[in-house]
Image (spheres, grey):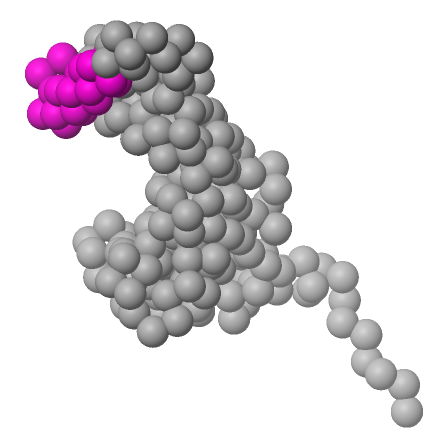
Amino acid sequence: MSRKMIPADEKVNAKRLIEEKCHKTLREGAQLLFNRKFEDALVKFNKVHLFDPNNANAFTLKSKCYLQLCDLKSAIANLKKAISLAPEEDDWPRQLSILMDAQGLNLLDQVRSKVPGWQLLLERALEFFTNAIEADSTEPFFWLHRAMAYTLRNSYTLAVSDLERYTFLDDSNAEVYIMLAKLNWRLDAQHSGQLNLDKAHDLDPDHPEVQILKRSVAKRNQAVFQQTSRTLLNNDTEG
């Protein structure tokens, strides 16, 4: 027995009805999202996907709902799906990079609290920061946040590299130069540390930490000067 063929015009009409239904449901969901009824909005967007599983706009709006519900993992997953379906959308990768950076910061808070398994969380945070940088390498704070994670892992050379990248993109943040000064001194790069402290002083001479570090360096330099003077008085030229 042969299968009954559906006329082409009926297929077109059915497709049009589905599209109209999706557009209507999408608009209703967007209005609920605007009114901060996030769970109700999610119901609408999930309904859209029943008719059109590859509706990229619905995935994007679901991502916004999950973000408002503080579910970053779901927000990231839905936005990634939207980008895979509509790679021509220029703004979505930027939004995704911000979400991944935020997830990295959430994990970093847990690392600082030394929750069980914090070492693994630190590595996951580094992955999120790296993904954010790969999505948008022009955002200086992504480099700063990864540098903070490297510092917690005691990877000071990598932290310095990221902070220097930050200063290439934004050279007006005294706090970053203070961090660079401390890390360079920890790595025994005294000259680089002093240059970064001088830069921080130029940007914000009244910064409390700049003043403390300046006094500390001056005290250290005075001690070195006195020791050198005593060595010379003892005719210990080589020393």
Residue 184 rendering spot, x and y as whole percentages: 38, 28
Q: Is residue 219 magenta?
A: yes
Q: Viewer-proximal residue, 62 or 74?
A: 74
Give coordinates of residue 189: x percent, y percent. 42, 25
Report the quarter where the N terminus lies.
bottom right
Q: Is residue 14 visible?
A: yes
Q: Which residues are magenta?
A: 203-227
Picture coordinates of residue 70, whole percent (x, y): 28, 60
The residue depicted at 36 percent of the width and 35 percent of the height is: 186
The quarter of the picture where residue 196 lies is top left
Callout count: 0
Residue 232 lies left or right of residue 77; in this view the side is left
Q: Is residue 12 left or right of residue 218?
A: right
- Residue 143 coordinates in the image, percent (x, y): 43, 34
Q: Is residue 22 left or right of residue 71?
A: right
Q: Residue at x 69, y 64 (%)?
A: 11
- Outermost residue, right side: 1
